[in-house]
Image (cartoon, helix red, strand yellow):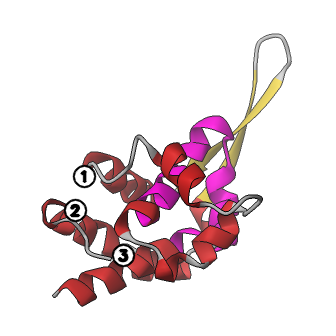
Amino acid sequence: MRIPEDRRESVKGLVKFLPYLEELTPEKVCHWITETSEDGVEKRYPTYEDTFIDFINTAYEEGLLDINYINVLQERAEPGMEIEAMIYGVDSADYELTMALLTFLVVQENLVPGVWTTAVASKLFTPIVSHLADMLEMDE
């Protein structure tokens, strides 16, 4: 379950957010904004707390997200297994699967605005980042 040597410092940057993630609530992380267009159509969209955006940006900017995450998840998931079950069982995952799960959570916001709020409510980011912290300790 080793973290690749060239990713260790980047993972450490992500793990620094663990205490923040452990205390995070949906009410703190997201505020919904409603705008009305000129033709009277209302549009709601989420805005996220700055520290949470820093966490997400760290994953992107440090190159930790896996562009092949869908293939990894398809190869590793048992038929019919839900992603949440995989996340809650992440303690036995290797680095590749752990990062595929993180990538899945991060990119879902592009498809379903507001889904990060649900992930925070379900504490889905915490087990992944906690497992990365454990992996760092094991490798030392």
Which quadrant would the N terminus be assigned to in this image? bottom left
Is 11 placed left or right of 21 in the picture? Answer: left
Give x and y (percent) for residue 73.
55, 54
Magenta stretch in the rendered image: 98-126
Q: Residues within 10 Å of mark 2 (few under 14, many from 20)?
A: some
CB atoms of marks 2 and 1 within 8 Å: yes
Tag count: 3
Residue at image mark 2: 10
What's the amino acid at mark 2?
A: Ser
Q: Main secondary structure of the magenta part?
A: helix
- Residue 97 visible from this viewpoint: yes
User: Of the numbered discs in the image, which one, if any, rests on residue 132?
Assistant: 3
42 within the magenta span: no
Closer-to-camera residue (73/79)? 79
Assign a secondary structure to mark 3: helix
At label 3, counting other C-alpha atoms closer than 10 Å, the crowd grade (few under 14, some 14-19, many 20 or more) is many
In front: 68, or 47? 68
Say if residue 27 shows up in the picture.
no
* Amino acid type, mark 3: Leu
In primary-sequence order, the first of circles 1 and 3 is 1
Residue 134 location in percent, x, y? 35, 86
Which residue in the rendered view is the most extreme toward the right? 40
User: Please, is residue 17 above or below residue 102 in the view?
Assistant: below
Mark 1 belongs to which amino acid? Glu
Question: Taking 53 as reference, is 29 left or right?
Answer: right
Q: Earlier in the sequence, mark 2 or mark 3?
A: 2
Residue underneath mark 1: 62
At x 16%, y 88%, the residue is: 140
Q: Secondary structure at mark 1?
A: loop
